[in-house]
Image (cartoon, helix red, strand yellow):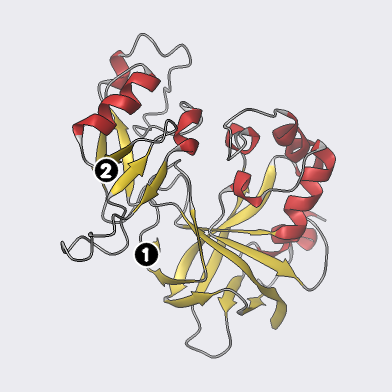
Amino acid sequence: MLIEIGHVEAIFRYPVKSMAGERLEVANLGWHGLDGDRRLAFHRVNDNDNDNDNDKDRSGFPWLSASKLPDLLLCTPHRNKDADADGAQGDLPTHIRTPDGEEMPVFGDDLATEVGRRYGAPVQMMQLKHGVFDEASISVIASDTVREISRLAGRSPDVRRFRPNVVVRLLRSVPFQEDEWLGGVLSFGEGDDAPAITVTMRDVRCSMVNLDPDSASPAPEVLKAVVRANQNNAGIYGAVTRIGRLAVGQTMFLHAASRTISEQSS
């Protein structure tokens, strides 16, 4: 059964993994997520031999993220005004504005040196055709969920802490409603050709949500609130099943799975 659940309140993409995001009015949803989303990332060179990292990542995940270097959140990717004339790819940034306000080319040695200095080990910028994602290529969260977590944490609501691709304003104002979508299909707009994603898993949160997007200062009470309120889950991940154009204001529909989460757990 097709159910109207709300509308698209905001769209975000993150050209460089863990750096500041871009808020968009429209975006193209391709088979590997939003065009231009997380197509660049810093690779931790020789990280297995990095004795300076007291919390060494033994998962084999090679990419530098803000959980390791919070200063990444204060780096702002952007396109040089002459980029289009130079034939640069339209969805990718050409420069990074560092926390100190310096402008550096994305693939320049100066940027890699500066980030490596802050991290304490060498890094290298890399471009990945299909992007660098922790779990899946598209993420969605409801604004009601963000507000409830913020209320419990005693913080002003800021959806940027959760780094979603799509924020949905729900018709039924209930936090953590996203859990009910698991196994279903979300479509953006009406019609059989509307872009759509299959909801594959809950978004299990990490310490990234503690970091203030404007200062990178930590607030541990945010993650504690997610754990306390919803077993560390906030929002969902999905796999793209139909490509197309996303836009702020689009009506969102859910084609629910045959059984709801509550029915499965009863």
Dot 1, crowdedness within 10 Å: few (<14), some or many (≥20)?
some
Q: Amino acid at mark 2?
A: Val
Q: Percent from the top left, x then y, of residue 87?
A: 16, 64
Secondary structure of the residue carrying numbered label 1: loop
* Residue with the most extreme bottom position: 191
Q: Is residue 69 left or right of residue 81?
A: right
Q: Is residue 97 left or right of residue 128?
A: right
Q: Earlier in the sequence, mark 1 or mark 2?
A: 1
Please state which of residues 141 and 25 is positioned toward the viewer in this rendering: 25
Work out which quarter of the rendered image holds the C terminus and state it.
Answer: bottom right
Q: Which mark is residue 204?
A: none
Please state which of residues 185 and 171 is positioned toward the viewer in this rendering: 171
Q: CA separation, marks 1 and 2? A: 18 Å
Where is mark 2, residue-wise?
A: 106
Q: Percent from the top left, x then y, of residue 7?
A: 67, 75
Q: Is residue 242 above or below residue 227?
A: below
Q: Is residue 181 above or below residue 53?
A: below
Residue in the image at 62% along x and 69% along y: 184
* Quadrant assignment, res 224: top right
Q: Is residue 135 above or below residue 221?
A: below
Work out which quarter of the rendered image holds the N terminus and state it.
Answer: bottom right
Residue 123 seen in this snapshot: no
Q: Amino acid at mark 1?
A: Asp
Please state which of residues 73 and 153 is positioned toward the viewer in this rendering: 73
Residue 191 seen in this snapshot: yes
Secondary structure of the residue carrying numbered label 2: loop
Q: Is residue 260 left or right of residue 134?
A: right
Please state which of residues 14 and 239 is positioned toward the viewer in this rendering: 14
Where is mark 1, residue-wise?
A: 35
Q: Percent from the top left, x then y, of residue 67?
A: 51, 30
Between disc 1 and disc 2, the foreground one is 2
Q: Percent from the top left, x then y, of residue 156?
A: 77, 44
